[in-house]
Image (tube, grey):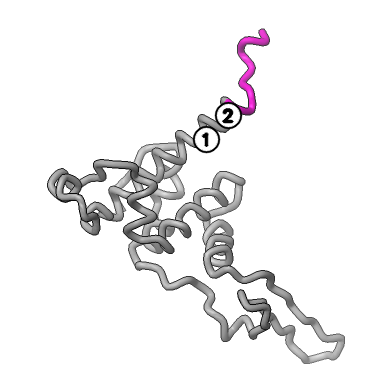
Amino acid sequence: MQGLRRTRGQEQREEQHRTALALGKAHARLGLWRLCDNDECRRSKCCGGDVDQCGARAAPQGWTWLHHVLKGLREGRSRPEAVEAANLATLGYRQRVTVRWKVKGWDPIEFVQLHDGSWEHADVADARPPLDERFVRLAESAWLRTGGPSGRARKV
């Protein structure tokens, strides 16, 4: 009976494997091999090396954002929640605060704390990092919801 139980290490390796598969499929769907300096990658129309390193080299901010989206999905968040968390993590806001007034008719105001420690109105600050539109379409696609991290990839 005890031989059937999985250890935490085994679960982590399985999760890393599923994430690596999802990143490999995402790399192919995004066509990041087109941006590679390696002639072999462009000739074969797929990554010939480490997909994670290639994605980080070809589109650093978008690849980091995609990692955060996948992490949010692994933690059980919905797709919109995972995308929002990825946006905040990639933008690097330290915190988000809402000020509510006890005066009837006054709307709450949201502030975000920037990298340098200063505060800015949330409606003025960027809500989404400047990403290649392909990353956003990938996150909105049915592939990420149904076939991304654990299932089969589908056409977008």
Percent across and percent down for residue 84 are 56, 64
Q: Residue at x 24, y 52 (%)?
A: 33
Circle 2 residue: 11
* Foreground pick, 92 / 103: 92
Q: CA distance from mark 1 to mark 2?
A: 6 Å
Residues drawn in magenta: 1-9
Percent across and percent down for residue 134 are 33, 62
Q: Is residue 6 magenta?
A: yes
Q: Which mark is residue 85?
A: none
SS at badge 1: helix
- Describe residue 42's horizontal placement relative to residue 100 as left or right: left
Circle 1 residue: 15
* Foreground pick, 124 / 13: 13
Percent across and percent down for residue 4 are 61, 13
- Describe residue 90's horizontal placement relative to residue 120 as left or right: left
CB atoms of marks 1 and 2 within 8 Å:
yes
- Describe residue 27's horizontal placement relative to residue 98 as left or right: left
Q: Name the image quarter holding the C terminus.
A: bottom left
Q: Is residue 5 magenta?
A: yes
Residue type at the position of mark 1: Glu
Is residue 64 depicted above or below 121 in this figure? above
SS at badge 2: helix
Q: Residue at x 41, y 57 (%)?
A: 63
Is residue 116 depicted above or below 62 in this figure? below
Local packing at callout 2 (Cα closer than 10 Å; few below 14, some 14-19, many 20+) is few
Q: Name the image quarter holding the N terminus.
A: top right
Residue 10, by quadrant, is: top right
